[in-house]
Amino acid sequence: MTLSRRGVLGLAGAIGSAGALGAAGRSESTGTTGTTGTTGHARTAGAGAATGAAGRVRTGFDRLAADGYAALAGEKVGVVTNPTGITADARHLVDVLHADERVDLVAVFGPEHGFRGTAQAGGSEGASLDPATGLPVYDTYGRSGQQLADVFAAAGIDTVLFDIQDVGARFYTYIWTLYDCMRAAALAGKAVVVLDRPNPVGGRRAAGPVLERPYASFVGREPIALAHGMTAAELARLFNGEFLTDRPVRLRTVPLSGWRRESFFGETGLPWMPPSPNMPTPDTALAYAGTCLFEGTNLSEGRGTTTPFEVVGAEGIDRRWAEAANALGLPGVWFREAYFTPSFSKHEGKVCGGVRLIVHDRDAFDPVRAGIGLLITARRVWSGFGWRADHWIDRLTGSDRVRTLVEAGADVDEVVGDWAVGLARFGAVREKYLLYP
């Protein structure tokens, strides 16, 4: 397939147009949820295959395909995806859908990092033609509301199909791409179908502060917990039921089967594909909700190393930080003195001292509590500690409360206790939209 000159001009016009934010609403769930899976006690972190699982988890895409793509029958489909949109045998769903005569796939939409996943944080790949299928690839990054609705209209689609692996943290932007696509689809009169994938860090509970609306941004559009403990389909249901009620979107979700909330990614039997360049393994995702807070400081969060978000540090830090962090007695994690040289991003080419997180009990580990503990101890032991000048930490945490409490000398329990009431309220709302046992 190739684009005509008119098609190319339409694509460029849609991508270049500006607009205002819209909204969306009511949800409809399809499919059933499975109950197979494993539980564990002091399970260790790891990205390997399932150990003792009763059966392989089936993703929303696998279940959609098994049903003969009935949910897409008669629809012109545009898919929002990236390298994580793969089948159980690691084929990309765009290639599979394009080759199947039962599906009329007419467009692909790329999020942050792009459809092929080549762009670094804060970037995308732009508009293009997919060389494998000839399909037009539209760039959604930085577009929302009417501007994104115009892109959907130019693509000539009836249904927006969403299939991207999330990692369970509010500031990972793919869930807000989903949110923006739901708003835009409602404005454009399109339906949305969300194909679910596991939360790789489990989903037993939510953790961390709940965002306050004055601090909303693309790393947090709406008031959800920092570690939300939900899947993409569950979040879509919550978005539609709580935040997009002024303009309902026609939403369908295709749930997982065989996944339980206590399961980590290594227990699913599914292949891992890095959702973004600095998310190489499920172990990275396990630490991310806590150590990504260091994006709001002058310390490196490990970008430009082989273990991003598992190491944190800066020039001039020594073993005293690891000693101070271990003295907190945080559950499920040890901190090891570490040294590394980032190849890009903060402190590029410079030897940094810091800590490496070693999660020895995933069930007990709370990444947000660990991140707070590391912020507090870094500030105590290193005189060079500083926040980013733009107070990015407030966007990441969802208010100025964490920053001001840490500056006031609060301990870990005081900081974590400060968000307890808001977290409990979110937990009660969250329960209404959960799909899995």
Image (tube, rainbow, N blue to C red):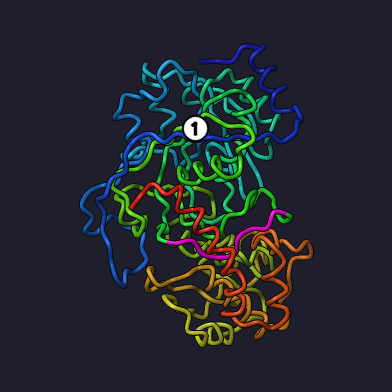
Q: Is residue 151 above or below residue 418?
A: above
Element under label 1? strand
- Across and down, in percent, residue 334 comes to 45, 79
| Residue situated in front as seen by the camera: 202 or 87 | 202
Q: Is residue 215 above or below residue 318?
A: above
- Across and down, in percent, residue 150 comes to 67, 24
Q: Residue at x 47, y 70 (%)?
A: 366
User: Is the residue marked by circle 1 packed among few (<14), some (14-19), or many (20+) residues within 10 Å?
Assistant: many
Q: Where does label 1 land, which residue?
A: 251
| Residue situated in front as seen by the camera: 432 or 216 | 432
* In the image, residue 75 lies in the stretch drawn in magenta: no
Q: Residue at x 67, y 36 (%)?
A: 144
- Across and down, in percent, residue 267 comes to 30, 56
- Across and down, in percent, residue 222 comes to 63, 50
Q: Is residue 353 above or below residue 309?
A: below
Q: Based on the displayed image, in which of its 4 quarters is residue 109 positioned? A: top right
As shown in the figure, which amino acid type bears the numbered disc 1? Leu
Q: Based on the displayed image, in which of its 4 quarters is residue 136 positioned? A: top right
| Residue situated in front as seen by the camera: 252 or 396 | 252
* In the image, residue 207 lies in the stretch drawn in magenta: yes
Q: Based on the displayed image, in which of its 4 quarters is residue 87 positioned? A: top left
- 238 horizontally vs 415: left or right: left
Residue farthest along the right direction in this orientation: 389
Q: Residue at x 52, y 80 (%)?
A: 337
Q: Residue at x 41, y 32 (%)?
A: 93
Q: Which residues are magenta?
A: 205-213
